[in-house]
Image (cartoon, helix red, strand yellow):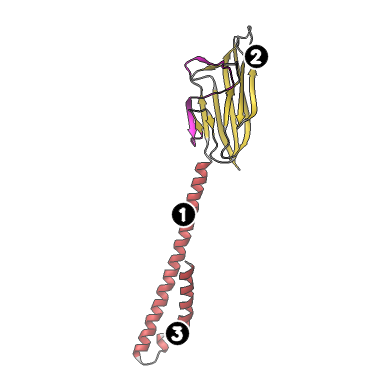
Amino acid sequence: MKSSTLISLALFGFFSAVRSDESCSPPADVCGFMRELAAMKESLKAINTGLLESERRHNTSEQQILNLYQKERSRVIFSAVTGGGGQAIGPFSTDTTVVYKEVFTNVGNAYNKDTGIFAPPVAGVYYFTFFYHAGGEHESKLFLYKNDQKMVMTHDHASQVDTADNGGNAVYLQLQRGDNVYVVLAAHTHIFGSSHHSTFSGRLVTMT
């Protein structure tokens, strides 16, 4: 584009010095040559204008594609439930990552239903919730982790009076690509596994 513009400017300067054919004097072949040069000048001006317009349209299209890409990247939301057909999950002898196997929605494909781990595709602030149902005769304790760090938890002690427990928590987290967010069931505790009770959800609030 720059080279075409320089050529056009150079030719424009040259042609500006050429007199029009109305003031041309013999020989006739010189006048004809000058008319051809003038026509070439107009043609090059039109080409240069066309190139500038093509570049403008290209830049506009490139920006539109970038905007669509950014919009698509900003759409991250998931929600999943443990599944399990009504069977208890736990108790286990060690802390265990809860795998929410049945996915309601997973826009952006950031949640892995095989591992129970959410991996943010873009840096930003995310909002997470997790809820559980459990039998009251057993202790229930869940942690939400960011990488290896406990962020928030929900907990209920065993009770012979309260036959069922429900609990949950929510948090905003600032995440980077490469981070992992997941829910851990504490050792020697349990939750109820079904298609309706114990859930894990999250969404991107804003990119950073």
Q: Nearer the viewer, residue 84 or 63?
A: 84
Q: Position of residue 180 (x, y in %)?
A: 57, 33
The magenta stretch is 84-110
Q: Amino acid at mark 3?
A: Val
State the residue position of label 2.
Answer: 157
User: Which numbered disc, 2 or 3, marks the residue that appears first in the sequence?
Assistant: 3
For the residues labelled 2 and 3, the Cα–Cα distance comes to 98 Å
Q: Nearer the viewer, residue 147 or 100?
A: 147
What amino acid does circle 2 point to?
Answer: His
Task: Place residue 165 in its image quadrant.
Answer: top right
Which residue in the structure is indicated by mark 3? 18
Instruction: Kindly indicate the quadrant of the structure image that contains residue 183.
Output: top right
Q: Are marks 2 and 3 in contact (CB under 8 Å)?
A: no
Choose the circle earlier in sequence order: 2 or 1: 1
Q: CA distance from mark 2 to mark 1?
A: 59 Å
Q: Position of residue 87 (x, y in %)?
A: 50, 14
Circle nearer the N terminus (3, 1): 3
The residue that disc 1 covers is: 61
* 26 vs 77: above or below: below
User: Mark 3 and mark 1: span between their CA atoms?
Assistant: 40 Å
